[in-house]
Every structure is written in C-alpha cells, then in structure tokens.
Amino acid sequence: FVVAGRDKKIPVSSMPGVFQYSIDRIDEEIDEVASAGIPAILIFGIPDHKDDKATGAYDEHGVTQEAIRHIKDKYPDLIVIADVCLCEYTSTGHCGMVDDKGHILNDETLPLLTATAESMARAGADIVAPSDMMDGRVAAIREGLDAAGFELTPILAYSAKFASAYYGPFRDAAESAPKFGDRKTYQMDPANGREAMREIADDLDEGADMIIIKPAMAYLDICKEARLRFNVPLIAYNVSGEYAMIKAAAANGWIDEKRITLETLTGMKRAGADRIITYHAIEAAHWLQD
C-alpha cells in the first residue's frame, strides 16, 4: 500500500504487520520482500485527492505510477503487478463511475480502467490486474494495451471476485470503502459458484492470461473447480479478513500462528493454486526456509 506524501509508515490497525508507505520509505518493505526471495508484489496506491472521475488512477504522475517507477528502477528483477481499479481514487469509493441515482455505470467505466492500465504499463508495471469486476473490462484493457504498444503486458484478471465480508481490513488499508450501498451489483454472489466459472470463461475469451479467485479460504471449491476446467495460471488471493483472523487468534494465544498459516496456504496450493497472493508472504517465506 503506497500513500501520497513523504516520510510515512502508517500501521493498518486491522492488519497487524501491514503498513501504508510513502514512496520514500517503501524500500523498507521491498528490501524485506527481496531478501525473502519473494518474486512479485501487488501494488495499491492511495492518492491525496479523490474525485468522481477517479483522475488519480490514470494520472501519469500519480502515486501508484511513481511508486512503480521507483520500484522497477531500484529492484528491476522484482515483478510488479499493478492493481487496476478505481475504488481507491473515486470520491464514492466504488469501483466504477456512478450516476446521480447511485447506479454503477459499467460501460462508462471501461475507458477509465483502460487508461489506468496503460498508465501503469508505461510506468513499468510487468503485469496489470483489473479487480473492478465491470463487464467487458478485460477486452477493453487488452485492446488499449495493444494499441499503446504493450502487447506483451499480461493481464491477471480478478475473474472470480465475490462480494465478500472478508474484505473489511483491506478497505481500511486502501481507504476504499464505498460511501454508500455495497458492491453486490458488480461483484459476485458468494452462493453462486456456477457463475464464477462463466465469469472466468468470459475473461479468458476476452484475453486474460491468468485468473484470480478471491477470497481463497471460503472458496477453495471454486479454486478446485477452476483448476479442473481451465488450463491457465490460477492465483488464490488470501485476503485481508483471512489474514486478520489468524493474526487476532494468534495474538490471543488461541492458535499456533506458524502452523495455521502454513496449513492455510498449503490448502490453497492443494486446491489448485499455482500462486498465492497473501499478506503472510514475508513471514511464510522465512518459515518455509527454516
């Protein structure tokens, strides 16, 4: 989580061990990532200004774009995955444009997501990861990237992203909670696993190179089914609420944090995940090396 400003390392109260960093201090975290042998990071930016057009998302000199340039300059071998969404940059906190009646404007959002992906690719992002769940966004982003000369930049699509209660701590960290309503009109119904398979198939047809299942722990059946159906890289997203629950239980002495964490991540691998996005990454990498 990269925040605008200088000399900032702000703890996320609901996620022990997780911080927002300003660009001038982000090396404190990236040094640990590199020393642990972690090959990739997923970056989220928190701008100092939000508006109804999410202009900070596609600002060529926005906080996320500048952070990507800094990281790729200093750590050229680290794979930087740029989250592509508008929720951190909109004054509404929603992932898309909103009309005066509070309706999400799917088609009007697509050009802004495309502009965001292009700006992050220009900044040096190795992979772009659209997490907004607007219909048709993978096709729009693929077309835009190709036209801008980024034909080789892969798309890691949040293809099966559910409208989950497990995201609460992330919204603290990214300062992206919706100001009204919820995201159930564009994220997926947790009860509807068959729709997840259709969403994945649509994203792959539109040009996605890799897919994300999010959340992971309560959706391992979705991971397994996707693994059996689709022969593409599959990533499980071990989300903030899952992390926070383990940290809270461990802080109370109720569980063995190391064993529970590694068992949880192993379950995701067993369900078919080729890679895992997790806030436990640095700790888990060191534990696996012990």
Image: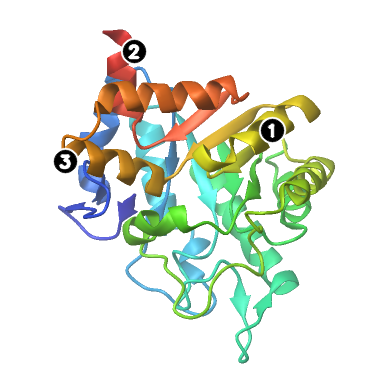
**Left or right: where 178 falls relative to 137:** left
| Side of 74 relative to 270 (left or right) | left
Pick whichever of labels 1 and 2 is earlier in the sequence.
1
Residue matched to label 3: 252
Q: Amino acid at mark 3?
A: Asn
The quadrant in which residue 212 appears is top right
CA neighbours of label 1 inside 10 A, class few (<14), some (14 to 19), many (20+): few
Which comes sooner in the sequence, label 2 or label 3?
3
Residue 17 visible (yes or no): yes
Residue found at the very far right of the displayed protein: 205
In the depicted view, which residue is nearer to us: 134 or 8? 134
Q: Are marks 1 and 3 in contact (CB under 8 Å)?
A: no
> Do the residues bearing badges 1 and 2 touch, measured as CB atoms within 8 Å?
no
Q: Position of residue 76 (x, y in %)?
A: 42, 26
Residue 152's disc number:
1
Height in image: 101 above or below 113? below
